[in-house]
Image (cartoon, rainbow, N blue to C red):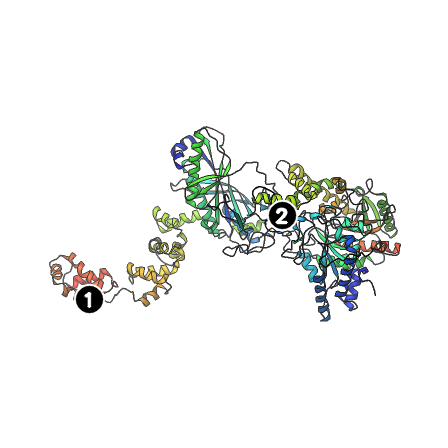
Amino acid sequence: MTDLTRLSAADLSILLTSGAVSSVEATQAHLDHIAAVDTDVHAFLHVAGANALAAAAVVDAQRAAGAVLGPLAGVPIAIKDVLATRDMPSTAGSKILEGWIPPYDATVVRLVREAGLIPLGKTNMDEFAMGSSTEFSAYGPTHNPWDLDRIPGGSGGGSAAAVSAFEAPLALGSDTGGSIRQPAAVTGSVGVKPTYGGVSRYGAIALASSLDQVGPVSRTVYDAALLHDVLSGHDPLDSTSLTDRWPSMAAAAIAGRVDGALTGVRIGVVKELSGPGFQPGVLQRFNETLAMLVAAGAEIEEVSAPSFEYAVAAYYLILPAEASSNLARFDSVRFGIRVDPAEGPLTSERVMAATRDAGFGPEVKRRIILGTYALSAGYYDAYYGSAQKVRTLIQRDFDAAFEKVDVLLSPSAPTTAFKFGEKMDDPMAMYLNDVTTIPANLAGIPGMSLPMGLAPEDGLPVGLQVMAPAKQDARLYTFGAAVEQLLEAHWGHTLLSLAPKLAPTQMFASEGGAV
Amino acid sequence: MKKAELMDYDKALELFEPVLGFEVHVELNTKTKMFCGCANEFGQGANTNTCPTCLGLPGGLPQVNAKAIESSIRLGLALGCEIAEYSRFARKNYFYPDTAKNFQTSQYDEPIAFNGQLTIELESGRQVTIDIERAHMEDDAGKLTHVGGATGRIQGADYSLVDYNRGGVPLVEIVTQMIEGGEADSPEIGRTYVAAIREIVKALGVSNARMEEGNVRCDANVSLRPRGSGKLGTRTETKNVNSLRSVERAVRYEIQRQAALLAAGGTITQETRHWHEDTGITSAGRPKSDADDYRYFPEPDLVPVAPSRAWVEELRATLPEPPAARRKRLQADWGFANLEFQDVVNSDLLDAVEATVAAGASAQSSRKWWTGEVARLANVAGVSADSLVEPVQLAALIELVTAGTLTDRLARQVLEGVIAGEGTPLEVVEIRGLAVVSDDGPLIEAIDLALASQPDVLAKIRDGKVQAAGAVIGAVMKAMRGQADAARVRELVLERAGTAE
């Protein structure tokens, strides 16, 4: 029988729809695979075995009763731990929320359930999504399925690893400065950050409100599109949610597979997002991909975005500023852990301080301190105010570029997956890993990462980033599906089929999972 | 400071010029909270009107209450403010357990309304124009209850409970510019200003405006400038002064306290102060410096509020007549003396009297009934007068008195019946059989009987001593159980005694 875990969500959907496979079987296959490999990978913080099988049985019963179900009904999905789930702990990778089960579902989680998807569990992440490696998770790092000694990217390393290790065909991620796209790049998977406001943030534990966006993680562009269609749409509970009606991303992806889909497409290569500081093998695969696109009829021109030079600096003012305020609510009063001071009176101020001291990890504290400073009276204009101006300039750079081209391309990350510990002592080096992905968040535009090969020097996946104008998410899917088809035709297989087979461990992963 | 240590008020005014400023918080009476769909009401169990947003749970996000925006704009317009074309919310960051998010969602440099003016009139007739700096929107904090201490304050408490039902209730904070030149009237200016705000929000219908329930709360800033000095003194901010009389007393107290301190060579600490209603003094709260850093920044979870000019004009058209103008008009229409009119205003019976007059009663009799018998009964029952009886019922009662169907004494009994829910005044008259006997037949019968039983009185009357008739009249009224018109009885007594005046 087919290994159900190796199928794309779309292919699994066909088997489910035809009745050849039940959702319970598909879900069980994924739970078994998680049990076999996740001790090594540690993509999951919580595995919802019984609940997942129960949800799958409901979908099977509905299908048996002749109900008309959505295309992803019965397909398993992994959920980033940053999203509130009423039946699973939601910790955002932090000690301070250890064991906290929210009384509500995030809007995207509700939509996923309503579409009949089966939540398998919650995936690991850097604490409060602050990081590019999952090394800042309070529950230990996730390992890259391509090389267990390497990082899976971050903050959404758990979701990307779950998908690339075939533990789930789909996952939900969140992207504040690249947390969906950079993990996708270093794990050979697909990840999309939608247009800001395209997907509801209600129930997504906020890192930086003006930058955060929830999006799909998958192994194929089409799968990402199917999930995107489930997630997008106006949510009255999120005031920054757009009221636009969105075209079908799945239809857009299918359009990309038509012959000639790349003919005449105007491609811009951002001068500032390649070159020095980028790993040679990354640039090599990027240039080869550009050459193939030209051969397929696309037109390429270099565009300059001079303000991108300041993007990382601006980002690391805006993000900590907003985060310092968003994370103020973690104070032990209403939810989460409470830690009393070792000595002295138990005033609320002292309990709050002791709780935050014990509950937050070093990177979170670093950013809270940075953000508190950046917002302080007398410094606001110089820091937060200036950063907002840079943001406007970056938006103008994008506007100017998109007057000339349809999509912008760059490597998704400057390097392939680095080794654990490599950048832990150098926050700046860690921050610079997001240099390619940050501009899209600052401008609110959509971005996608899809695999474009392995770097010759280390044999690790390299990601291609595609960016489109705000609200033109469909363009990402059309173009992305075309590029994916072009590359896979060239390789003769999918990139992930090259990933080393993970040896099942002898350990028993219990239903409760890792946490 | 003990009362005995305060400086004499006149002496304080001789040495110093008071400078005032007020921040009035108005709780809006919208159905739901400012940033979520929870009910804006109390009296439920603690923390029942809450959701992920107003509890500040991870992942909760705010949504702006459109009605609260509307109410804020109307209030801004009523205060003569300009309404911003582009207004933003901002986060005011500080840690306190009654603030679920550990920031208040407020407005900073882009308030919804600004640059207003409000003219108030003091009892002396002096007009004072208060400049309004801004009126901005924000959400209220939850309610802390300190358990275990003797005073109910946090000091000495064993623990504190927090109820977030009030957390997220919409507030408008109205901030005045500095008020100079108030001089000896300063305390009265405070009271009158807050009364005017209260009257306006009530007339607009945007707040329940009950100070005793905290719907309108006043923070009073007071500082003293030595006469002849151009330099402002250090101010104190007395928080949550929650009755009109207290505003007046608190301002007066602070003037006397600060004057005593300054005259003795002391300095004023810039701080918040607590008002103690029972003892009539203020006490030190927390130090408050101008450098308090709330790290304001634009609220990224909300989009800017940009009310269209057309909408603003639409809302302007819904504004009621300004309360002060309305008072002037009504006093003139009704021809009330100042004291009579003040009596009505101070008893909060302007609406009731107006409605009663509109229902056909004369202004004077409406005033007399509302501030007299109705107010007395309300006082006994411990409720507000206008909740006791409908103006249209009272007008009907007055009509019966005017027509001679009821004497005042009977009318009071009918009023009791109406209040007891026995029906309209006319129905009560019928049920209780209280109407004045206007048929002379039974009266003559009773008079003849009374005269016959008091022959000495009859003789006196016939001798021209008509004042002796009083005894007969009394007996007749008694026999009629009060249901007779005494004047008519007197006429008939004299007639039956064979004397004509």
Q: Please give the label number shown on residue B393.
A: none
- Secondary-structure class at tag 1: helix
**Mark 2 Cα shell of 10 Å, populated few (<14), some (14-19), many (≥20):** many
Which numbered mark, 1 or 2, is in the foreground of this view?
Answer: 2
Do residues under tags 1 and 2 come within 8 Å of each other at their CB atoms?
no
CA gap, disc 1 and disc 2: 87 Å
Q: Residue at x 15, y 60 (%)?
A: B500
Is B97 drawn above or below residue B44 in the view shown?
above
**Mark 1 Cα shell of 10 Å, populated few (<14), some (14-19), many (≥20):** many
Front residue of A267/A125: it is A125
- Secondary-structure class at tag 2: loop
Would residue B186 be visible to someone looking at this image? no
Q: Chain of mark 1?
A: B
Front residue of B251/A320: it is A320
Q: Could you say where residue B28 lies in the image, as x and y percent from the top left?
A: 51, 51
Q: Which residue is mark 1?
A: B446
Left or right relative to A384: residue B11: left
Q: Count every numbered label the image shows and give the total.
A: 2
Q: Could you say where residue B88 lies in the image, as x and y percent from the top left?
A: 60, 46
Would residue A164 be visible to someone looking at this image? yes
User: Where's the N terminus of chain A, which quadrant?
Assistant: bottom right
Q: Could you say where residue A458 lies in the image, as x and y percent from the top left?
A: 86, 46
Q: Please give the label number shown on residue A330.
A: 2
Q: Amino acid at mark 1?
A: Ala
Q: Could you say where residue B177 lies in the image, as x and y percent from the top left?
A: 50, 39
